[in-house]
Image (tube, rainbow, N blue to C red):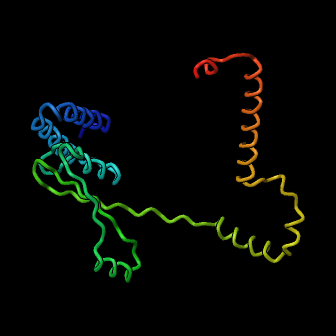
Amino acid sequence: MASMESIALRSGFLQEAAHLLAISSPSASASIGLARLSFIENANVDISVKEREALRRGTCGACGSLLIPGWSSRTSSESQGKDQKKKAAKDTTAAKTNVVFDCLRCHRKTEQNLQPQPRRKLRGQQKASATTLVTRSKPVMEDSKLPKTANASSKQRQKARKGGLQAMLEKNKTQNSSQGFDLMDFAM
């Protein structure tokens, strides 16, 4: 049996050759892709599940052509039907979505299961609800005593900015009018 390094190098070479010939000679690319698949299977190499899925996603298992979406393959996603969802709800398993790769050369369908992403726990939301309960129990009068200058609302900031711009325009008008005649003075 050959060393792991030589297997990886030969597999990489076959993959690059298949990619280079994909557009100019799709049939040669497909035969090289099929040779790569058979080489990997015959080498008795333990491949991780992630690498095996990437290999299935990149090359058709029947004809060996590269699965390029829109060019040599069509991709679609399928989720479970209504009947299957009811059964899955009873089994307390998460709903699964499949990605289907249709080879446009040999019309073989390759399905891959997409693992659902784990749900994030919202710890901050639980803490926020606890703090809002505490703040609501305080009297409302304390809020009105606090100065509002620290955090002005967006409307107040907009009014201040608008007023500042108008003041600058008025100042520029008075300076420009005292300098003398302008082109617009003679236009009419």
Q: Which quadrant: the C terminus?
A: top right
Report the number of discs.
Answer: 0
Is 135 left, or right, of 110 in this rendering?
Answer: right
Is 138 left, or right, of 95 in this rendering?
Answer: right
Q: Position of residue 18 (x, y in %)?
A: 19, 35
Q: Which quadrant: the N terminus?
A: top left
Residue at (57, 66) in percent of width and height: 121
Q: Position of residue 65 (x, y in %)?
A: 16, 43
Is residue 59 positioned above or below 81 on the image? above
Q: Farthest residue to the front: give it.
A: 188
Along the viewing direction, whichever of 133 and 172 lies nearer the viewer: 172
The answer to whether residue 43 shows anywhere in this view is: no
Residue at (27, 64) in percent of width and height: 78
Residue at (54, 64) in percent of width and height: 120
Along the viewing direction, whichever of 181 and 150 lies nearer the viewer: 181
The answer to whether residue 155 shows anywhere in this view is: yes
Residue at (60, 66) in percent of width and height: 122
Residue 129 lies in quadrant? bottom right
Along the viewing direction, whichever of 175 and 126 lies nearer the viewer: 175
Q: Position of residue 176 (x, y in %)?
A: 73, 22
Is residue 109 positioned above or below 58 on the image? below
Is residue 43 positioned above or below 85 on the image? above
Is 14 left, or right, of 175 in this rendering?
Answer: left
Q: Farthest residue to the bottom: give it.
A: 90
Q: Position of residue 75 (x, y in %)?
A: 24, 53
